[in-house]
Amino acid sequence: MGRRGGAGLGVCYELYSPAGVEPRALFTRAATTLVMVTAATGRPQRITDELRQVWQPYVEEPVAFTKRG
């Protein structure tokens, strides 16, 4: 997990070649932004302190993307 905001968080990931394939190759890097919403209203809902504590062990630096020409 990368950046966390008031109602959203970034999920970052890298996809590699299957286990056992050598040399290991990075296929892609991606980031997805998830926003917590209240189901009844569809409006953003702030992430609670409790959820932040649960997710803390998974927080890392966001993936780095190369510049596109």
Image: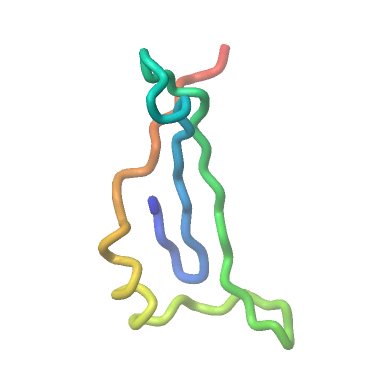
Above or below, comparing residue 9 to residue 69 in the picture: below
- Residue 26 is situated, as x and y percent measured from the top left of the image, at 44, 23
Tell me where residue 66 sits by quadrant: top left
Q: Residue furthest front?
A: 20
Q: Residue at x 38, y 19 (%)?
A: 24
Q: How is the image coloured?
A: rainbow
Tell how many labels.
0
Above or below, comparing residue 64 to residue 33 in the picture: above
Above or below, comparing residue 1 to residue 30 in the picture: below
* Picture quarter with the C terminus: top right
- Residue 11 is situated, as x and y percent measured from the top left of the image, at 47, 52
Q: Residue at x 47, y 53 (%)?
A: 10
- Residue 54 is situated, as x and y percent measured from the top left of the image, at 32, 74
Above or below, comparing residue 44 to residue 63 in the picture: below
- Residue 44 is situated, as x and y percent measured from the top left of the image, at 61, 74
Q: Residue at x 69, y 83 (%)?
A: 39
Q: Residue furthest bottom?
A: 40
Q: In the visual, does 47 lie left or right of 60?
A: right
Q: Residue furthest right?
A: 41
